[in-house]
Image (cartoon, rainbow, N blue to C red):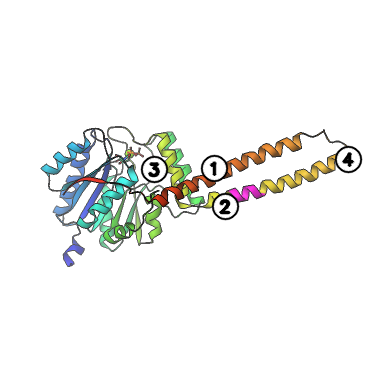
Amino acid sequence: MMDTISKPVIGIISPCYNEEQVINDTENQLRNLIVTMVASNLISDKSFVAFVDDGSKDNTWNLIETLASLNKQVKGLKLVGNVGHQNALLAGLLTFNEDADALISIDADLQDDISVIETMIQKFNTGIDVVYGVRKERTTDTFFKKNSAKLFYWLIQKLKSNMIPNHADYRLCSKRAINCLSYYNEVNLFLRGIIPSMGFTSAIIYYDRLARTAGNSKFPLRKMLSFAWNGITSFSTLPLKLVTAVGFIVFFLCLIMTAYAGIAIYTGDAVPGWLSTVLPMYFLGGIQLFSIGVIGEYIGKIYAETKQRPRYFIDKKII
Ligand code: UDP
Ligand code: MG
Protein backbone atom coordinates (compact mmCIF):
# COMPACT_ATOMS: atom_id res chain seq x y z
CA MET A 1 0.00 0.00 0.00
CA MET A 2 2.87 2.38 0.81
CA ASP A 3 4.05 1.97 -2.73
CA THR A 4 0.79 3.10 -4.28
CA ILE A 5 0.75 6.13 -2.03
CA SER A 6 4.18 7.26 -3.10
CA LYS A 7 3.77 6.15 -6.72
CA PRO A 8 0.13 6.26 -7.78
CA VAL A 9 -1.28 4.70 -10.92
CA ILE A 10 -2.61 7.62 -12.94
CA GLY A 11 -5.01 7.26 -15.86
CA ILE A 12 -5.59 10.08 -18.34
CA ILE A 13 -9.06 9.89 -19.88
CA SER A 14 -9.77 11.63 -23.15
CA PRO A 15 -13.14 11.54 -24.93
CA CYS A 16 -12.87 11.66 -28.72
CA TYR A 17 -15.51 12.42 -31.29
CA ASN A 18 -14.23 12.48 -34.88
CA GLU A 19 -10.71 13.35 -33.78
CA GLU A 20 -8.69 11.46 -36.42
CA GLN A 21 -6.73 14.61 -37.17
CA VAL A 22 -5.42 15.14 -33.66
CA ILE A 23 -5.37 11.76 -31.97
CA ASN A 24 -1.90 10.63 -33.05
CA ASP A 25 -0.29 13.81 -31.85
CA THR A 26 -2.32 13.81 -28.63
CA GLU A 27 -1.37 10.22 -27.89
CA ASN A 28 2.26 10.99 -28.55
CA GLN A 29 2.32 13.96 -26.17
CA LEU A 30 0.38 12.23 -23.38
CA ARG A 31 2.39 9.01 -23.63
CA ASN A 32 5.68 10.95 -23.54
CA LEU A 33 4.45 12.76 -20.47
CA ILE A 34 3.60 9.47 -18.78
CA VAL A 35 6.98 7.97 -19.67
CA THR A 36 8.73 11.06 -18.27
CA MET A 37 6.72 10.97 -15.04
CA VAL A 38 7.36 7.24 -14.62
CA ALA A 39 11.11 7.86 -15.15
CA SER A 40 11.11 10.59 -12.52
CA ASN A 41 9.40 8.24 -10.06
CA LEU A 42 6.32 10.43 -9.73
CA ILE A 43 3.85 7.79 -10.94
CA SER A 44 3.65 4.03 -11.27
CA ASP A 45 4.62 2.39 -14.57
CA LYS A 46 1.07 1.01 -14.73
CA SER A 47 -0.15 4.53 -15.52
CA PHE A 48 -1.95 4.92 -18.83
CA VAL A 49 -3.87 7.08 -21.22
CA ALA A 50 -7.35 5.88 -22.25
CA PHE A 51 -9.21 7.22 -25.27
CA VAL A 52 -12.98 6.98 -25.26
CA ASP A 53 -14.42 6.88 -28.76
CA ASP A 54 -17.80 8.58 -28.55
CA GLY A 55 -19.33 6.93 -31.62
CA SER A 56 -17.02 8.70 -34.09
CA LYS A 57 -17.93 8.44 -37.76
CA ASP A 58 -14.37 8.80 -38.98
CA ASN A 59 -11.26 6.71 -38.48
CA THR A 60 -10.79 7.56 -34.78
CA TRP A 61 -11.41 4.08 -33.37
CA ASN A 62 -9.06 2.36 -35.83
CA LEU A 63 -6.35 4.79 -34.84
CA ILE A 64 -6.99 4.12 -31.13
CA GLU A 65 -6.75 0.37 -31.76
CA THR A 66 -3.46 0.76 -33.58
CA LEU A 67 -2.01 3.04 -30.90
CA ALA A 68 -3.11 0.64 -28.16
CA SER A 69 -1.53 -2.32 -29.91
CA LEU A 70 1.77 -0.47 -30.24
CA ASN A 71 2.05 0.94 -26.71
CA LYS A 72 1.29 -0.65 -23.37
CA GLN A 73 0.43 2.76 -21.89
CA VAL A 74 -2.54 3.20 -24.22
CA LYS A 75 -6.04 1.88 -23.56
CA GLY A 76 -9.28 2.40 -25.43
CA LEU A 77 -13.01 2.32 -24.93
CA LYS A 78 -15.50 2.32 -27.78
CA LEU A 79 -19.06 3.43 -27.11
CA VAL A 80 -21.87 2.09 -29.25
CA GLY A 81 -23.15 5.50 -30.38
CA ASN A 82 -22.53 9.20 -29.89
CA VAL A 83 -23.71 10.15 -26.39
CA GLY A 84 -22.03 13.54 -26.06
CA HIS A 85 -18.93 14.75 -24.27
CA GLN A 86 -20.24 14.52 -20.68
CA ASN A 87 -21.57 10.98 -20.97
CA ALA A 88 -18.51 9.81 -22.90
CA LEU A 89 -16.29 11.22 -20.19
CA LEU A 90 -18.38 9.54 -17.49
CA ALA A 91 -18.10 6.22 -19.33
CA GLY A 92 -14.31 6.60 -19.35
CA LEU A 93 -14.12 7.57 -15.69
CA LEU A 94 -16.38 4.78 -14.42
CA THR A 95 -14.77 2.14 -16.65
CA PHE A 96 -11.12 2.90 -15.92
CA ASN A 97 -11.49 3.79 -12.25
CA GLU A 98 -10.74 0.19 -11.32
CA ASP A 99 -7.36 0.40 -13.07
CA ALA A 100 -6.03 3.58 -11.44
CA ASP A 101 -5.63 5.49 -8.16
CA ALA A 102 -6.67 8.73 -9.82
CA LEU A 103 -7.97 9.76 -13.23
CA ILE A 104 -7.31 12.97 -15.11
CA SER A 105 -9.82 14.04 -17.74
CA ILE A 106 -8.70 16.12 -20.69
CA ASP A 107 -10.09 16.97 -24.15
CA ALA A 108 -8.51 15.18 -27.08
CA ASP A 109 -7.50 18.41 -28.79
CA LEU A 110 -5.08 19.23 -25.94
CA GLN A 111 -6.29 22.82 -25.66
CA ASP A 112 -5.59 22.40 -21.97
CA ASP A 113 -1.94 22.70 -21.10
CA ILE A 114 -0.65 19.23 -20.20
CA SER A 115 2.39 20.62 -18.41
CA VAL A 116 0.28 21.17 -15.26
CA ILE A 117 -0.55 17.47 -14.99
CA GLU A 118 2.57 16.95 -12.91
CA THR A 119 1.43 19.57 -10.41
CA MET A 120 -2.03 17.98 -10.31
CA ILE A 121 -0.46 14.67 -9.34
CA GLN A 122 1.74 16.30 -6.71
CA LYS A 123 -1.39 17.80 -5.16
CA PHE A 124 -3.06 14.39 -5.28
CA ASN A 125 -0.05 12.89 -3.53
CA THR A 126 -0.55 15.30 -0.64
CA GLY A 127 -4.01 13.79 -0.11
CA ILE A 128 -6.22 16.12 -2.14
CA ASP A 129 -9.06 14.31 -3.90
CA VAL A 130 -10.01 16.71 -6.68
CA VAL A 131 -7.69 19.07 -8.56
CA TYR A 132 -9.38 21.52 -10.95
CA GLY A 133 -7.62 22.96 -13.95
CA VAL A 134 -8.73 26.56 -14.42
CA ARG A 135 -7.99 28.67 -17.50
CA LYS A 136 -6.15 31.90 -16.86
CA GLU A 137 -7.02 33.74 -20.06
CA ARG A 138 -9.01 32.80 -23.08
CA THR A 139 -6.63 34.52 -25.44
CA THR A 140 -6.84 31.89 -28.17
CA ASP A 141 -10.60 31.57 -28.21
CA THR A 142 -12.71 33.63 -30.55
CA PHE A 143 -14.19 36.90 -29.28
CA PHE A 144 -17.59 35.27 -29.20
CA LYS A 145 -16.54 32.15 -27.31
CA LYS A 146 -14.57 34.20 -24.78
CA ASN A 147 -17.44 36.50 -23.95
CA SER A 148 -20.20 33.95 -24.04
CA ALA A 149 -18.20 31.86 -21.59
CA LYS A 150 -17.69 34.90 -19.35
CA LEU A 151 -21.41 35.59 -19.36
CA PHE A 152 -22.16 31.94 -18.60
CA TYR A 153 -19.89 31.78 -15.56
CA TRP A 154 -21.16 35.13 -14.32
CA LEU A 155 -24.72 33.84 -14.58
CA ILE A 156 -23.84 30.54 -12.95
CA GLN A 157 -22.33 32.36 -9.98
CA LYS A 158 -25.36 34.58 -9.64
CA LEU A 159 -27.42 31.39 -9.58
CA LYS A 160 -25.41 30.30 -6.56
CA SER A 161 -24.18 27.08 -8.02
CA ASN A 162 -20.89 25.88 -6.61
CA MET A 163 -19.31 25.63 -10.01
CA ILE A 164 -15.69 26.74 -10.44
CA PRO A 165 -15.46 29.66 -12.90
CA ASN A 166 -13.39 28.95 -16.01
CA HIS A 167 -13.00 25.32 -15.16
CA ALA A 168 -13.97 23.03 -18.01
CA ASP A 169 -13.57 19.30 -17.61
CA TYR A 170 -9.81 19.31 -17.14
CA ARG A 171 -9.35 17.83 -13.68
CA LEU A 172 -7.92 15.09 -11.55
CA CYS A 173 -10.24 12.95 -9.44
CA SER A 174 -9.18 10.37 -6.90
CA LYS A 175 -10.52 6.83 -7.04
CA ARG A 176 -12.87 7.42 -4.13
CA ALA A 177 -14.22 10.64 -5.65
CA ILE A 178 -15.07 8.71 -8.83
CA ASN A 179 -16.61 5.94 -6.74
CA CYS A 180 -18.93 8.57 -5.29
CA LEU A 181 -19.61 9.95 -8.75
CA SER A 182 -20.95 6.54 -9.76
CA TYR A 183 -23.86 7.03 -7.34
CA TYR A 184 -25.17 9.99 -9.34
CA ASN A 185 -27.69 8.51 -11.74
CA GLU A 186 -28.82 11.66 -13.45
CA VAL A 187 -29.36 11.64 -17.17
CA ASN A 188 -28.80 15.40 -17.53
CA LEU A 189 -25.20 15.05 -16.59
CA PHE A 190 -23.25 18.20 -15.78
CA LEU A 191 -19.97 17.08 -14.24
CA ARG A 192 -18.73 20.61 -13.55
CA GLY A 193 -21.62 21.07 -11.18
CA ILE A 194 -21.72 17.60 -9.63
CA ILE A 195 -18.07 17.22 -8.72
CA PRO A 196 -17.70 20.38 -6.61
CA SER A 197 -21.01 19.55 -4.90
CA MET A 198 -19.61 16.24 -3.61
CA GLY A 199 -17.48 18.22 -1.20
CA PHE A 200 -14.11 16.48 -1.42
CA THR A 201 -10.94 18.39 -0.58
CA SER A 202 -9.86 20.21 -3.69
CA ALA A 203 -7.23 22.47 -5.19
CA ILE A 204 -7.06 24.69 -8.25
CA ILE A 205 -4.26 24.80 -10.82
CA TYR A 206 -4.15 27.68 -13.30
CA TYR A 207 -3.03 27.26 -16.89
CA ASP A 208 -3.18 28.99 -20.27
CA ARG A 209 -5.76 27.79 -22.73
CA LEU A 210 -4.16 26.91 -26.06
CA ALA A 211 -5.63 26.80 -29.54
CA ARG A 212 -6.92 23.57 -31.07
CA THR A 213 -3.99 21.99 -32.96
CA ALA A 214 -6.13 20.52 -35.75
CA GLY A 215 -9.70 19.62 -36.60
CA ASN A 216 -12.74 21.69 -35.74
CA SER A 217 -14.57 22.38 -32.52
CA LYS A 218 -17.29 19.80 -31.98
CA PHE A 219 -19.31 22.39 -30.12
CA PRO A 220 -21.09 24.69 -32.52
CA LEU A 221 -23.10 27.59 -31.13
CA ARG A 222 -26.28 25.53 -30.90
CA LYS A 223 -24.65 22.83 -28.77
CA MET A 224 -22.89 25.39 -26.60
CA LEU A 225 -26.10 27.24 -25.81
CA SER A 226 -27.94 24.04 -24.99
CA PHE A 227 -25.03 22.93 -22.78
CA ALA A 228 -25.13 26.23 -20.89
CA TRP A 229 -28.89 26.06 -20.45
CA ASN A 230 -28.61 22.46 -19.32
CA GLY A 231 -25.97 23.51 -16.80
CA ILE A 232 -28.22 26.18 -15.35
CA THR A 233 -31.39 24.14 -15.17
CA SER A 234 -29.64 21.02 -13.89
CA PHE A 235 -28.22 22.88 -10.96
CA SER A 236 -30.51 25.66 -10.02
CA THR A 237 -34.19 26.18 -9.49
CA LEU A 238 -33.60 29.91 -9.21
CA PRO A 239 -35.12 30.53 -12.67
CA LEU A 240 -38.38 29.10 -11.29
CA LYS A 241 -38.23 31.42 -8.29
CA LEU A 242 -37.33 34.30 -10.58
CA VAL A 243 -40.45 33.63 -12.60
CA THR A 244 -42.55 33.85 -9.45
CA ALA A 245 -40.87 37.13 -8.50
CA VAL A 246 -41.38 38.61 -11.95
CA GLY A 247 -45.02 37.52 -11.86
CA PHE A 248 -45.48 39.26 -8.54
CA ILE A 249 -43.84 42.48 -9.70
CA VAL A 250 -45.96 42.56 -12.83
CA PHE A 251 -49.10 42.00 -10.78
CA PHE A 252 -48.09 44.88 -8.51
CA LEU A 253 -47.44 47.17 -11.48
CA CYS A 254 -50.87 46.30 -12.83
CA LEU A 255 -52.47 47.30 -9.54
CA ILE A 256 -50.75 50.69 -9.77
CA MET A 257 -51.82 51.01 -13.37
CA THR A 258 -55.42 50.23 -12.43
CA ALA A 259 -55.34 52.87 -9.74
CA TYR A 260 -53.91 55.36 -12.21
CA ALA A 261 -56.59 54.53 -14.76
CA GLY A 262 -59.24 55.03 -12.09
CA ILE A 263 -57.88 58.46 -11.24
CA ALA A 264 -57.66 59.40 -14.92
CA ILE A 265 -61.31 58.51 -15.43
CA TYR A 266 -62.28 60.48 -12.36
CA THR A 267 -60.38 63.63 -13.43
CA GLY A 268 -61.80 63.26 -16.88
CA ASP A 269 -58.57 63.08 -18.92
CA ALA A 270 -58.84 59.43 -19.75
CA VAL A 271 -58.10 58.72 -23.39
CA PRO A 272 -60.89 56.21 -23.86
CA GLY A 273 -58.14 54.00 -22.80
CA TRP A 274 -57.42 50.98 -24.77
CA LEU A 275 -53.80 51.35 -23.75
CA SER A 276 -54.46 50.46 -20.14
CA THR A 277 -56.34 47.37 -21.26
CA VAL A 278 -54.22 46.21 -24.10
CA LEU A 279 -50.79 46.89 -22.68
CA PRO A 280 -51.12 44.75 -19.53
CA MET A 281 -52.69 42.03 -21.63
CA TYR A 282 -49.68 41.72 -23.89
CA PHE A 283 -47.32 42.22 -21.02
CA LEU A 284 -48.90 39.53 -18.86
CA GLY A 285 -49.31 37.24 -21.83
CA GLY A 286 -45.61 37.49 -22.46
CA ILE A 287 -44.64 36.86 -18.86
CA GLN A 288 -46.99 33.90 -18.65
CA LEU A 289 -45.65 32.27 -21.77
CA PHE A 290 -42.11 32.79 -20.57
CA SER A 291 -42.91 31.31 -17.17
CA ILE A 292 -44.61 28.30 -18.64
CA GLY A 293 -41.56 27.82 -20.81
CA VAL A 294 -39.21 27.80 -17.84
CA ILE A 295 -41.40 25.42 -15.89
CA GLY A 296 -41.75 23.24 -18.97
CA GLU A 297 -37.97 23.05 -19.19
CA TYR A 298 -37.82 21.55 -15.71
CA ILE A 299 -40.69 19.18 -16.42
CA GLY A 300 -38.77 18.04 -19.48
CA LYS A 301 -35.80 17.32 -17.23
CA ILE A 302 -37.98 15.41 -14.76
CA TYR A 303 -39.35 13.40 -17.67
CA ALA A 304 -35.87 12.46 -18.83
CA GLU A 305 -34.81 11.57 -15.30
CA THR A 306 -37.84 9.40 -14.55
CA LYS A 307 -37.16 7.29 -17.61
CA GLN A 308 -33.69 6.55 -16.22
CA ARG A 309 -32.38 5.55 -19.59
CA PRO A 310 -28.85 4.18 -19.72
CA ARG A 311 -26.37 6.92 -20.45
CA TYR A 312 -24.04 4.92 -22.65
CA PHE A 313 -23.34 1.43 -23.95
CA ILE A 314 -19.86 0.00 -24.17
CA ASP A 315 -18.97 -1.66 -27.44
CA LYS A 316 -15.33 -2.65 -26.83
CA LYS A 317 -12.66 -2.11 -24.23
CA ILE A 318 -8.94 -2.40 -24.91
CA ILE A 319 -6.74 -2.70 -21.83
N1 UDP B 1 -16.55 15.31 -27.79
C1 UDP B 1 -17.17 14.07 -27.54
N2 UDP B 1 -18.47 13.88 -27.96
C2 UDP B 1 -19.18 14.85 -28.61
C3 UDP B 1 -18.55 16.11 -28.84
C4 UDP B 1 -17.24 16.30 -28.42
O1 UDP B 1 -16.58 13.18 -26.96
O2 UDP B 1 -20.34 14.60 -28.97
C5 UDP B 1 -15.16 15.52 -27.33
C6 UDP B 1 -14.20 16.05 -28.39
O3 UDP B 1 -13.64 15.00 -29.15
C7 UDP B 1 -13.15 16.75 -27.54
C8 UDP B 1 -13.96 17.27 -26.37
O4 UDP B 1 -15.18 16.52 -26.36
O5 UDP B 1 -12.18 15.86 -27.04
C9 UDP B 1 -14.24 18.74 -26.47
O6 UDP B 1 -14.75 19.06 -27.73
P1 UDP B 1 -14.27 20.33 -28.56
O7 UDP B 1 -12.79 20.50 -28.47
O8 UDP B 1 -14.84 20.21 -29.92
O9 UDP B 1 -15.01 21.48 -27.76
P2 UDP B 1 -14.50 22.99 -27.47
O10 UDP B 1 -13.09 22.89 -26.96
O11 UDP B 1 -14.60 23.70 -28.76
O12 UDP B 1 -15.46 23.48 -26.43
MG1 MG C 1 -11.59 21.93 -27.72
* Label 3 sits on residue: 137
Tell me the number on the disc at residue 267: 4
Q: Give the spatial CA distance, label 4 vs label 2.
A: 39 Å
User: In this picture, is 119 found above or below 250?
Assistant: below
Q: Secondary structure at mark 1?
A: helix
Q: Give the spatial CA distance, label 3 vs label 4.
A: 62 Å
Which of the marked residues, 3 or 4, is nearer the chain's N terminus? 3
Q: Residue 14's quadrant in the figure?
A: top left
Q: Give the spatial CA distance, label 1 vs label 4.
A: 41 Å
Furthest-bottom residue in this view = 2
In the rendered structure, does residue 245 fall within the stretch colored magenta?
yes
Magenta segment? 243-248
Residue density around tag 2, few if under 14, some if 14–19, many if 20 or more, within 10 Å: few
Q: Is residue 139 left or right of residue 232?
A: left
Which of the marked residues, 2 or 1, is nearer the chain's N terminus? 2
Q: Nearer the viewer, mark 2 or mark 3?
A: 2
Which of the marked residues, 1 or 4, is nearer the chain's N terminus? 4
